Image (spheres, rainbow, N blue to C red):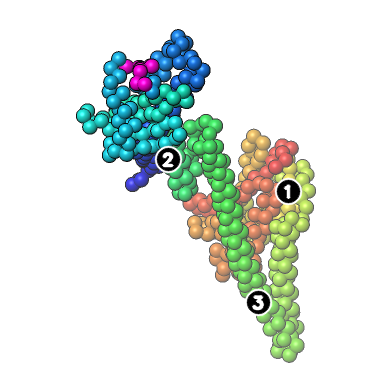
Amino acid sequence: MRWSLKKEIASVFIILMTSTIFLCWFVNNTFLERYYVANKENVLLNAYNEINQAGNDGTLMSDDFLMQFEKITSTGNISILVIAPSGKVIMSSVYDYDMLNQQLLKNIFEQNTDDVTVLSKEQNYIIQKTRDPQINTDYLEIWGNLENNNLFIMRTAVESIRESVSISNRFLSYVGLCAVMISAMIIWTVSEQISKPILDLARISKRMTKLDFEAKYTRGGSDEIAILGNHINKLSETLEKTISELKTANNELKTDIEKKEQIDEMRKEFLSNVSHELKTPIALVQGYAEGLKECINDDAESREFYCDVIMDEANKMNKMVQKLLTLNQIEFGNDKIALERFDITALIHGIIQASDILIKQKDVKVIFTVKEPIYVWADEFKLEEVFTNYFSNALNHVANEKIIDVKITKYENNISVSVFNTGDRIPENDLDNIWIKFYKVDKARTREYGGSGIGLSIVKAIMDSLNKKCGVSNYDNGVEFWFELDSNVPQNN
């Protein structure tokens, strides 16, 4: 960063302190001498008032006032001379008072000279600034007469004031320079301590802009920056939670859209499949019915054939509609599941025996060696539908050795029922699709035995309603369909 907060804070304080010290030096250099002079005027005036009061009281030469006189002259660094109108020296703060006496006479008889600058003039005294050309020194004087008619002069050197001002300014310069250097180091350290947590917050906020919410403010404390850091942490957590919820909602929305699109496609496909499946039998029924009406063949055998075709096609349509209704009820939960305990072995033997005529017609060898009762928990009516679909598919697709092998495999708490038939394998790309309504691997062959492509969809829907698994596996010499059931009391899912 070209200008960091640390540099800005340090620069502002250093400039402010330097300016303050320079201003103090400028004020000292410009106004301190004037202030000293004004202060000395007050000191001289106070000294005059005390001496004048003592003169009026008649205590001018008393021991107490002489002590006070010494204090006034030493404390104020004032030279004082008091003389009578006759010229007799009454009081003097210096041994060599001739110079003061001469200056007093000069002031009395030579007023308004170039060496004198009158600062204040009253009835009994004059305050003025004079310059001694011999020693090139300026003095501040007050002279005149006391109320008891004694003459006086008081003076103090202005040069000492100037020297004090010069010393003060030099001292202020040295102290100011040291103060600026020390303060600069202190301010640099303090500003670094202030800017560090702010830089941490800046880095955290930068990571937050990139949706990285792992960074947290950890410096602690109870100042404003710590409060801001805690709020940043809470904001980070809230944003993370909100973005997570938005992503979840967005994902759910995408899933819902995909499901909707899938449902629309399934609806279109369903309508197309139903139309396709019904088109052929309806056309046959219509054609043979028209043939009967127009008496194309008058012999009884032809009429019976026509009627048989019409009845057969109508029966196929009826079965397909019944299967669609059954599938619809299962998928939408309208068909209630009635769990009961029954013998699956007996159910399988019954279905195989009911298909005995078809088995013999196709010269199929059915293997089912289980004899002992095996009890399961399921809906017996729906399980009959499942096994019937498996067994019917096996009869319709059995080939080569023409073997159908039915097995019941026991596990710890459940069993697996499988129906294997020799013949062609199902293409791997079709294994997941055979459970979809109207999906047919070999449409010509399915039409040949009157299949509608709904049977396995019913199987999948029934097993899903029972919360049990079903599936299909390819083998080198055939295909096996299977499903699982509870052999103990079923647990709540």
Whole-percent x and y of residue 38? 41, 33
- Number of callouts: 3
- Is label 2 in contact with label 3 (beta carbons under 8 Å)? no
Residue highlighted by disc 3: 279
Residue highlighted by disc 2: 199
- Of badges 3 and 1, the one in the foreground is 3
Whole-percent x and y of residue 369? 64, 43
Q: Secondary structure at mark 3?
A: helix
Q: Nearer the viewer, residue 97 or 263?
A: 97
Q: Residue furthest top?
A: 63
Judge whether residue 81 can be spotted in this image: no
Magenta residues span: 86-94
Q: Residues within 10 Å of mark 1 (few under 14, many from 20)?
A: some
Q: Is residue 327 magenta?
A: no
- Is label 2 in contact with label 1 (beta carbons under 8 Å)? no
Q: Residues within 10 Å of mark 2 (few under 14, many from 20)?
A: some
Q: Nearer the viewer, residue 149 or 216?
A: 149
Q: Residue 41's image quarter?
A: top left
Q: Residue 166's image quarter?
A: top left
Mark toward the start of the polypeptide (2 vs 1)? 2
Q: Is residue 61 left or right of residue 399?
A: left
Residue 347 image label: 1
> Label 1 amino acid?
Leu
Whole-percent x and y of residue 426? 52, 58
> Label 3 amino acid?
Lys
The residue positioned 55% from the left and 56% from the top of the image is: 432
Mark toward the start of the polypeptide (2 vs 3)? 2
- Quadrant for the C terminus in the image: top right
